[in-house]
Image (cartoon, rainbow, N blue to C red):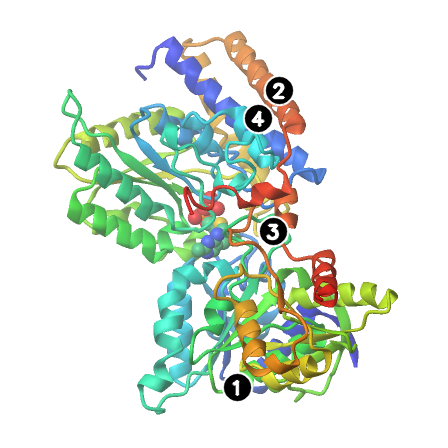
Amino acid sequence: MQLNREALTRAYRQMKLIREFEERLHEEIQTGEIAGFTHLYCGQEAVAVGVCEHLTERDKIVSTHRGHGHCLAKGCDVDGMMKEIWGSQDGLCNGKGGSMHIADIDKGMLGANGIVGAGAPIAVGAALSNKIDGPDENGKLAIALAFSGDGACNQGTTFEAMNLAVVTKAPCIFVFENNHYSEHTGVDYAVGTVQDIASRAEAFGMKVWRADGTDFFAVYDTFREVLEYVRTPGNGPAAVEFDTERFFGHFEGDPQRYRGEGELDRLRAERDCLKIFRASVTGAALLDAADLDKIDADALQAIEDAVTAARAGARPQPENVLDNVYISY
Amino acid sequence: MAKLTYRDAIRNTMFQEMQRDERVVVLGEDVVGGMGTAGGPEAIGGIWSTTTGFYDAFGPNRVIDTPISESAIMGAAGGLALAGKRPIAEIMFADFIGVSMDQLWNQIAKFRYMFGGKSVCPAVIRMPCGAGYNAAAQHSQMISQFVTGMPGIKVVMPTTPEDACGLMRQAIRDDDPVVFLEHKFLYGLTGEVNEDPDFCIPFGHARLARAGKDVTIVASGMMVRYAETAADDLAQDGIGCDVIDIRTTSPLDEEAILDSVEVTGRAVIVDEAPPRCSLATDLSSLIAQKAFASLKAPIEMVTPPHTPVPFARELESAYLPSPAKIAAAVRKTLDYR
Ligand SMILES: Cc1ncc(C[n+]2csc(CCOP(=O)(O)OP(=O)(O)O)c2C)c(N)n1
Ligand SMILES: [Mg+2]
């Protein structure tokens, strides 16, 4: 733990913002106001934040269908995201994409993705671009990374991307978030290397790390090592697997009959990255409860404001359907 | 006759065919649902509830829950079929055809031709498709134009529960590979279904969903429902429409379309796919080539614009064909000169 007060505060604020964003969406979706499919990131916050807190705007990330946490952690605007999910013309993607396709290229956020396994090859391409651009004045490369789930690690695209990254020495990081489920299927059934994804990456010839994804500090410290390695020219890609938990259904509306008796209560009690963070920083007297409570209140307010803004956001007009298919045509 | 939903018509027919023929097997993502979890197999029973109860009835050899690997699902369906089984593979959303395209287009579709007629590949590929749920650009598409353009593949697009039943049974018993396009919006539709255990609807036979002498509307899948609504509205104003549900896009019942246009002289084609190189352009060219002399007005196409499927509610409704847009197109053909 080498984070100063400011960095700790920032990390907690980011995680809390994601948590409140998702908890609020969970409520709003019940009312029917939000259209489409929404996959909530609640429970996995420490991964997105523990990873993205190390990145600069030159580093690129590629996300998944469960992308809100990655977007917020990479600096996407909260109001712009909320408006997008509400389908507003003022949303980050003009209401064209919605929850599953939020992107902010200027922030290095190359898109959430509706196609499972589509992200890894895109990240390799972005990493190769960074390799072509070469190291900065400190001799370090900008990187690109793909977040992938335990389900996505079964796609051929993910395998091909890993091999391509290895043979081209692309500064690419494959971040596997193992939340033990792909939709309604358990990782024990779907992943042949029993509960272990990192060993697959290792078999492709890259260095791998593993850490507990519910412990922000484990994620943060592990990822610093991963990043240091991949930023060094000549090393090529690496992979890291985080063991994490999803607190809601696969999508909003999922009856979750595949869960065990009391499973969700147990996860919320024992595997909540925010609770674990709070206990750890207050225990070590790094931040006090009042500081954290203040951040909690601020996050709640930020989300309240975002929802108000989203409700009032301009609606798209029918003719907007034709916008942005091409740049020129 | 039994009253069934479109969903249950599909489910029950597959179930009955699995009982009847041991070679029939099902594979796809979450077709069992709950594998490797505390809830156990069948905790979910398929995300579209089209395979609920299959695993318990037929076991893991014949009901194969797969990891997220569309390319392998499609290819395995091809391999199962070449080796003598009759697989029914589910691609959870038709959009994911992109991941599996080679195995369908270069493999399954072409085996028989490339092998000089020596192979049989009786695979059924089910693909829930279509827009209307604000599921945006990668979970809403109509992909009929891609598969209809593949020589070697038969393409089915049922609209009613009865057709879903008869066409599914035909698809399973057919010796050629069949892509079965189920419209997500139709799953809840109920209707009378023929209970004869051998009830099949042969491919290449259109259904006349509405009869009228003024304008021919040709549609498929969900678009047939919109066309029926439009035709019923127009009937109030004394305008009669033939609504032709083509049921299978390949093979195509050309005769049903041409016969109708010869009477009406006016044609409106409704298609859920974007307008370039699509079913709409294909049917328009058919009519222009073979019923030119009968035409009293230019052929109208009601399709989405040449764009991906947008997310926001307002945008998706602007994108999709609707009964109002179809009725306007019908009136346009009548107002011509
Ligand atoms: C190519 C493709 N196949 C299937 C799906 C349907 N689908 C969406 S998310 C998902 C499960 C993904 O599991 P995982 O990668 O573990 O991510 P998680 O949902 O756990 O975040 C599936 C099967 C899809 N969107 N794209
Ligand atoms: Mg998962």
In the image, residue B32 lies at what x, y percent?
54, 63
Instruction: Give the label, 3 or 4, closer to the camera.
Output: 3
Q: Secondary structure at mark 1?
A: loop
Q: Are marks 4 and 1 in contact (CB under 8 Å)?
A: no
Q: Which comes sooner in the sequence, label 2 or label 4?
A: 4
Give a yes or no on whether discs 4 and 1 share a subunit.
no
Residue type beneath disc 3: Tyr
Q: Dot 4 falls on which chain? A: A
Q: Which residue is mark 3?
A: B319
Q: Secondary structure at mark 3?
A: helix
Instruction: Give the label, 2 or 4, closer to the camera.
Output: 2
For residue B174, which numbered disc appears in the image? 1
Q: Is residue A280 above or below residue B313?
A: above
Between marks 4 and 1, how big is the CA–CA gap?
53 Å
Give a yes or no on whether discs 3 and 4 share a subunit.
no
Q: Dot 1 falls on which chain? A: B
